[in-house]
Image: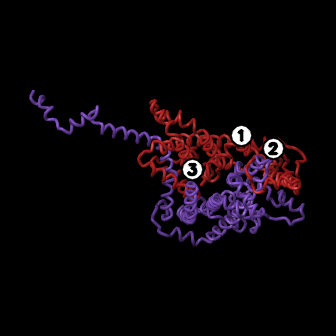
Chain colours: A red, B purple
Amino acid sequence: MTTRTLVSPAQLARPRARYVYWTALVLVLVLFTAVFLGPLYWMVTGGLKSTQEAVQSPPTLVPSSFHPETYARAWEVMDLARLLLNTLWYAFGALAFQLVLDVSAAYSLSRLRPVLGKAILGMMLATLMIPAAVLVVPQYLTVLDVPVVRRNLLDSPWAIWLPSVANAFNIFLLKRFFDSIPREMLDAAAVDGASRLRILWSVVLPVSRPILGVVSIFAVVGVWKDFLWPMLTLPDPTKQTLNVGIYSLASGVPENVLIAALTIASVPTLLIFLVFQRNIMSGLTAGGLKG
Amino acid sequence: MPSASALPSSERPEARAQRDSGPRPAPARAALLRSLGHHLSAHAFLIGAVLCFSLFSWYPMVREFLLAFQRTEDGRTYWAGWDNLRTVLADPAFWQAWRGTLLFTGLALVLGFAVPFVVALVINEFRHAQAYLRLLVYLPVMLPPVASVLLFKYLYDPGHGLFNSVLAALGLPEQQWLQDPDTAMLSVVVAATWMNMGGATLIYLAALQSVPGELYEAAELDGAGLLRKIWHVTVPQTRLVLSLMLLMQIIATMQVFTEPFLLTNGAGPEGATTTVVYLIYQYAFNFNDYGAAAALGLLLLVLLSGFSAAYVRLSRTAEDA
């Protein structure tokens, strides 16, 4: 660490200050671990308790007897395999649509600059100004009866995939990144006779890996965390997402089974986070402020 | 044939000039075609996203305005003028929902705006374990909201919840948390802050790292203590990020829905956690009154557009800086 912060290095070097520093560090570590990991510990161990112990007052800090079979029961009773597969299907489908359609749109707006391109970009960015919650009702009505094609998309994955493409923040991030690619790189490829698709594929995409990573993670996590929209558009219990499925079954199962289901539902995103934490954290700050 | 031999001489001078100037007979037309091809293929790259925006952003935006002034009865839709707005304003839940929303936003700003900044300041001071602390704070953001919310419901349970047993162990009076109209909203805000503060904390941390160290040294020469350094150096240096985050949090928290919906079934004890978006949800999906839902949505949009406009202006200055 070379950056200078509030407390000066000279001040820290004093023997008493070092003592204060280490005490403060230990206190903060204990406090933060308790606040942020504590509930997760409670969740994992709550799923290991027996049904009686899970609703016992006062609660036990460590389960008095371990019941890992609660997890198996949660998996069965709440049909978590199906909910998990559904959610994966929606999340990765949305990712594929966003990568193909948003990347090619941002490439066109940034590099090909078609007639009316500026106006289209402006209209896309304008959607960031509209509070998302306000649009839920008219969007839902659109899903019920899609204009022109007259199709009802209720209970269809398209109801998740297509709206996810209309993400102005993606377009903004991607276009800004494409704008920063040196013109000479693209011109060189064009002189070699490469088509536009070819330039996008073999010149633009390889250098855009960092931003594609950020957009991909946001796309998957976005679908994974969404609640209201999938609750409205996928009412069929066999088509629901993890969030909605667990919510709709929550009141019908014993507490320990529910808590075990919550733990299972949390594992995939926590894994994504632990594997990609560097990309996620740098994306959060490099991508600027999400609006 | 005379007409054939006369052809070259009858040729117009402009046409000849044109042929002489270029290798092809009509380069202007070729250029036009090329440019048309260019724009067509450029639009081909755009069309998928444009269709999705049209169906799921632009058309719903227009429809929101239309719906707010229409009513549908027995399958017939007609213009209703300000009727929907009047219905919404006359609803006793209207003021309750605004009070709930403002209370949530106010509490969420006290907790969700101040706490991440202080946490970022603290983390930034340590020379050890920074990565671990950052990881901890951001961990809840990655959980599916239903998991964190139902977990908090379990922790808040007045009978077998962890929070009451901690209070009991400390000799403090136990609380009804989500069941008590006085504490319900605060309990919702605490859960929401735990779930969401990671993002703001990391953004503040990044901003803190860009504060030039010399400024702190200069402040120390002037004899400034810790609090004065924070107030006179840290806050002004990170003001832009702080204001952007403030506006963004106002916009986001005014649209709160999931947390109260899952923790207190939306309305909460004596309607204490009713929010505007929950009321919109009720109009649309419990009462099938899309007109009232759209009218209330329009009010929320008008109120928030001021904050959105301020956000856009501020982020422009951020880009220029």
SS type, badge 3: helix
Q: Position of residue B124 (x, y in %)?
A: 75, 53
The chain that hosts pointer 2 is A
For label 2, the residue is: A70
Front position among marks 3 and 2:
3
Chain that bears disc 1: A
Secondary structure at numbered mark 2: helix
Q: Amino acid at mark 3?
A: Phe
Q: Which mark is residue A275?
A: 1
Q: Is residue B266 above or below residue A203?
A: below
Residue on which disc 3 sits? A169
Which residue does the image show at 61% across and 69% down from the upper left? Answer: B94
Give the quadrant of the N terminus of chain B.
top left
Q: Give the CA distance from mark 3 to mark 2.
A: 41 Å
**Residue type beneath disc 1:** Val
Residue A140 versus residue B105 in the image, above or below: above
